[in-house]
Structures are given as structure tokens and as C-alpha cells.
Amino acid sequence: MVRDSRGTPQADAVVELLRPDLSVLERARTDESGRYRFAAVAPGVYEVKASAELFLPTLRENLHILN
């Protein structure tokens, strides 16, 4: 879920699934509740970046996806 600094869900934000070298694997847009979904993610280590028109991009690093 993507939220602003006050905790308000952000609709229509762009969320990117990134490899550790920051190359983009997949992009998604958030729904009206700030939720997003990536189709299929293989086990591994990833970064997730969220950005929208009215806030600075946020990067979450070292996310481990397990089987």
C-alpha cells in the first residue's frame, strides 16, 4: 500500500519493482485505496519504488521474496 506522510492512501501512484541494480522489472499503478499488485514475482531480493505527482519518490530496499 502506498500512503503519504500523513497515512493517506495514494491513488494512481506508480510503483516499480526493481532489481538490486535498480533496473525495472515491472510497473503497477495504485488503486483508489493505494493498493497495487505485481503479476508474478520470483523468489529473490528486490527494491520497490513508489512515486506520484505530489510527493517525492520513496525507495524500499533489500526486500526478500521467499518461495
Image (spheres, rainbow, N blue to C red):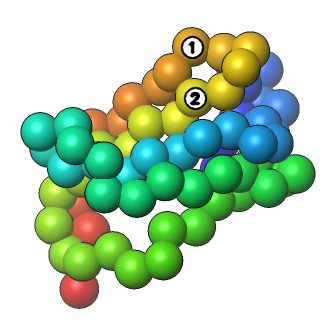
Q: Is residue 10 left or right of residue 43?
A: right
| Whole-percent x, y for residue 23 in the image | 22, 43
Location of residue 14 (image quadrant): top right
Camera-nearest residue between 28 and 33: 28
Label 2's element? strand
Q: Is residue 30 left or right of residue 67?
A: right
Q: Residue at x 16, y 67 (%)?
A: 44
Mark 2 touches mark 1? (CB < 8 Å): yes
Camera-nearest residue between 45 and 18: 18
Task: Give the numbered dot on residue 51.
Answer: 2
Distance from label 2 to label 1 (Cα)? 6 Å
Q: Is residue 66 above or below residue 46?
A: below
Camera-nearest residue between 7 and 20: 20
Crowd class of label 1 (few under 14; some 14 to 19; many from 20; radius 10 Å): few
Amino acid type, callout 2: Ser
Q: Is residue 54 above or below residue 45?
A: above
Q: Quadrant of the C terminus?
A: bottom left
One can see residue 40 in this view: yes
Amino acid type, callout 1: Leu
- For disc 1, the marked residue is 56
| Whole-percent x, y for residue 13 in the image | 68, 38
Task: Give the numbered dot on residue 7.
Answer: none
- Return the disc, 2 or 1, that comes first in the chain's sequence: 2
Crowd class of label 2 (few under 14; some 14 to 19; many from 20; radius 10 Å): some
Q: Residue at x 71, y 51 (%)?
A: 30
One can see residue 62 in this view: no
| Whole-percent x, y for residue 8 in the image | 83, 32
Q: Residue at x 39, y 30 (%)?
A: 59
Label 1's element? strand
